[in-house]
Structure formats: C-alpha cells, structure tokens
Amino acid sequence: MLLYCHIPFCDSKCHYCAFNSFTHNHHLKKEYMRALMRQLRRELEQKNPSKLQSLFIGGGTPSTIDANLYEPLFELLEPLVDKKTEITFEANPNSASPDWLQGIKALGANRVSFGVQSFNEKKLKFLGRAHTPSQAIQAIENAQKVGFTHINLDIIYDTAMDTKKLLQYDIAQALTLPIDHISAYALSIEEDTPFAKTPQAAANKEEFGYLIKELITLPQYEVSNFGSYRCRHNIGYWELRPYIGIGCGAVGFDGKNRYYPCSDLHAYIQNPLAIQNERLNSQELRLERLFLGFRSIVGVERSLCDEKKVQILLNEGKLLQKGDRLYNPNFFLADELALYLS
Ligand SMILES: C[S@@+](CC[C@H](N)C(=O)[O-])C[C@H]1O[C@@H](n2cnc3c(N)ncnc32)[C@H](O)[C@@H]1O
Ligand code: SF4
C-alpha cells in the first residue's frame, strides 16, 4: 500500500500554484496534526494494509511543520514500515533548516524533495517564490550532510522568462548538486491563481520540453521525472495502485473509487472523517491506465488498446512492445497516443 499525507500550510503562495494550501491559520498546525491522525487511524482500520511500500508527505509545505509534530504519525505507522519503505518529505528551501532535516531523518525519512523551481533570482521572483538560489543550494547541501542519499529537486520550465541559456544554467546548476532525481514541470496555468490573469506567463514552447530532456543527463522515466533512482511512490501512482490519502485536500484511491477528504481547513479539523467518494467506471479506469502508462516507463497492457490502431503505431515505430505490454518511446506524445488508442 502507498500512503500520501497532505500538509496544507505554506509560508507564501506562489503565482502558479493551485495546490490546497493556506498561508494563514498556522496556529492550527497542532490541531491539524491531531485531525490527520484521526483520519489515519480510520483509514488503517478500514484498509488494514500489511506493509507500506511508500509514504509521501507532500503539500503545501511539510517543512513548515516542526519535525517533532510528525512523531505520532511515525509511531502509528511503525509496524507497517520497514527498511524497504520509501519515505519522502517535500520541503521548501527557506524552511528546511538543518534541524528540521535532522529531525525527519531521525524519524525514518530516506528521501527529500525540494521545490527549487530555478536558480535564477529573477525567475524565482517572477514565480513568486520565497527563497533565493543560494538558499536552495544550501538546503540541498545540508540534506546531504545530514545523510540523505535520495534527494530530488523540482524545476519549472516553459515560463515567459525562459531562454535556452537560462534553462542550460538551471539544469547545469542542478546537476552540480548531490541529487539523484529531478522533476521538471512545464508551467501550467491553473484557475484561481495569480497567473490565471496573465496566462502569457507560460511560453507554451514545445521545444523547451525537448531541450530539458536533452540537458538533464539523468534517465527520464516519466514525462516530468528523471532519476538514477526512480521514486517508488510515483511509480505506484502510474501503475494505478491503491493509495491511502490523508489530509485536508488530499486524494485517495482504493482501486475503484477516488476519495477526497475535505479541502476546507476548519471543516477538516472539525471532522476529518467526512470524505467524498467518486466511483470510477471500467471505461474511466481503462483511460487512466492508458494516460498514466504512456506517460511513463510503466506502459500499457496491449489488450486495453484498439488492436488495429496498435498495429499501425507498431509499424510506424511510435509504439514498442515487450511481452504483452506496449511502451511509448516519446513521453511528450503520451496524451495524443492515449487519446488515439482509447
Ligand atoms: C505540490 S508542490 C509542493 C512543493 C513545495 N511546496 C515547494 O513548492 O517547494 C510540488 C511541485 O509542483 C510543481 N508545480 C506546482 N504547480 C505547478 C504549475 N502550475 N505548473 C508547473 N509546476 C507546478 C512545482 O515544481 C512544485 O515544486
Ligand atoms: S508551489 Fe509549494 S510553496 Fe508554492 S504555494 Fe504551491 S505548495 Fe506552496
């Protein structure tokens, strides 16, 4: 079983971000963590997993919460965790202090993922980030000093500020650091974010994707993910494995239903057990498998695809087959492939 835990607090709100997070109400953190535990206990009773393959604490900004406030969560999960469990915390460079990194390492975290976005000061300001390039470099070096060997950094590209030179600089700088993974996301303009009013903030240049792929020397294993180490939690999502989702604005999946804990902070704290359910029919599940499988090294079972069209794409070299699965050699074309074969 996979477990996702959502921390909906941020120090400030970035201009592009639509994730569920709050910059106020930080005084509710302790109560929030208690509510989170209530939901987790309920989920464990209902789903009764024997082991956790991965635990991903994401956000929002998990590094806005003191490491010791995560202790009850780790105590409860102890019987489900072993040496093989991948335990990732997301962190922001301005709040992931050496003490915090030490604290989560002591709890058992073995992977940390930093939201860096860029090493260019002006691009960081343009994106509305709260940290400087040198803070990001320092935070990653601190994570290495504390003993983390699995370190990711997130980059955003395809912004109006990007040029070939700027992206070359961003990736070259990233690759000098002690990381084994880069998530590089093309800027998407999301509703109800400041960038929704200035959609020209995104360059929408396809060639930037290909440039990023060329610049990042780590192997690409999904459209936005590159690593000598492949994140098991991510792979679990793309394999459409069930996952428990806890926290305000999290999402869970039990194999047939997606479920949504409340995304309002006060309401969640009051009742973390009020959860909305969305049943996926077999056609929707099949489409999920197509879209997720073609975006990544997971691939898709051949029997799920339109047979005549598969043959055409195999002949044209746009699909590869191994055993009874089909693989996409160009992840940037995943959506077109999935639509065509659906
Ligand atoms: C869930 S966020 C949390 C990470 C952490 N709070 C941080 O920002 O440092 C994970 C990543 O998603 C990416 N992201 C969020 N919104 C995006 C958008 N609209 N377009 C592209 N990437 C986005 C950013 O790279 C971000 O680091
Ligand atoms: S990108 Fe990260 S820090 Fe910025 S608002 Fe979103 S979750 Fe918060």
Image: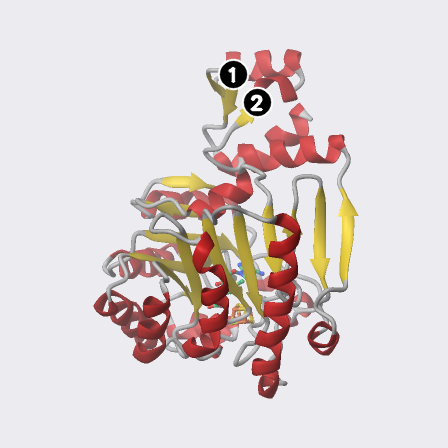
- Residue at 55% across / 57% down in the picture? 4
Tag 2 and tag 1, C-beta contact below 8 Å: yes
Closer-to-camera residue (184/198): 184
Quadrant (top left/top right/bottom left/bottom right) for the C terminus:
top right
Q: Is residue 105 visible?
A: yes
Asked whether, in this view, residue 16 is left or right of residue 176, the answer is: right
Left or right of residue 46, residue 297 in this image: left
- Is the residue marked by circle 1 packed among few (<14), some (14-19), or many (20+) residues within 10 Å? few
Image quarter of residue 176? bottom left
In this view, 88 is above or below 286: below
141 w.r.t. 132: above or below = above
The image quadrant of residue 132 is bottom left
On screen, residue 89 above or below 305: below
Check disc 1 and report the residue beneath it: 324
Q: Position of residue 55 (x, y in %)?
A: 47, 55
Between the residue at mark 2 and the residue at mark 1, the CA separation in whole angstroms equals 6 Å
- Amino acid type assigned to the residue bearing label 2 in the image: Glu
Q: Return the x and y of residue 26 as percentages of the image width and height.
A: 58, 85
- Tell me which amino acid carries mark 1: Asp
Q: Which mark is residue 301?
A: 2
